[in-house]
Image: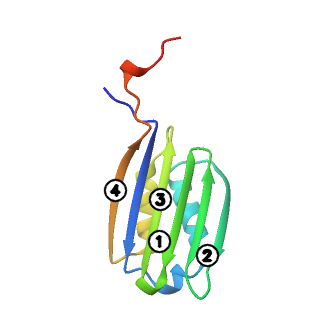
Amino acid sequence: MTEALATHLLIELWGVDEALLNDERALEAHLLAAAAAARCEVLGSVRHRFHPQGASVVVLVAESHLSVHTWPEHRYASVDILTCGATLPDAGVACLIERFRPERHEVQRLARGLVRPSLRQIP
């Protein structure tokens, strides 16, 4: 059996309201809500508004991070949720879908840091 150290969810959001995709404070609030839904411990966040449009926000959590980068001119947002431990990243995705209200979305799941038992060192 193979175990992963972390789960990385890549979320593609199309058809999102342009005003939201330009509002770095609202984006931060949405990521913080998703972190809470995923049962992550928030350590801090950074947000940046680009000119003439777009924004990026990163929320650092004890279990890794959540991030969003937006292209309002395409009504598109790229979101990452990377967590380890006893978190619920899928609950974070559900929270974001509810808040962003995309016309269409896709989620890719990656197992990060695969550990094969035969490669583990025994103390």
Residue at horizontal 53%, vertical 11%? 123
Query: Are the residues tagged 1 and 4 within 8 Å (C-beta)?
Result: no
**If the image is split into quadrants, where does the N terminus sit?**
top left
Point out the tag, 2 or 1, that comes first from the N-terminus. 2
Mark found first going from the N terminus, 2 or 4: 2
Which circle's residue, 2 or 3, is located before the other in the chain? Answer: 2
Q: Which residue is mark 3?
A: 80
Residue holding disc 4: 108
CB within 8 Å, label 2 to label 3: no
Disc 4 element: strand
Q: Nearer the viewer, residue 6 or 113?
A: 113
Please state which amino acid type lies under the numbered disc 4: Gln
- What distance separates the C-alpha of mark 2 from that of mark 1? 14 Å
Marks 2 and 1: which is nearer the front? 2
Instruction: Name the residue furthest top.
Output: 123
Q: Mark 3 and mark 4: span between their CA atoms? A: 10 Å
Q: Earlier in the sequence, mark 3 or mark 4?
A: 3
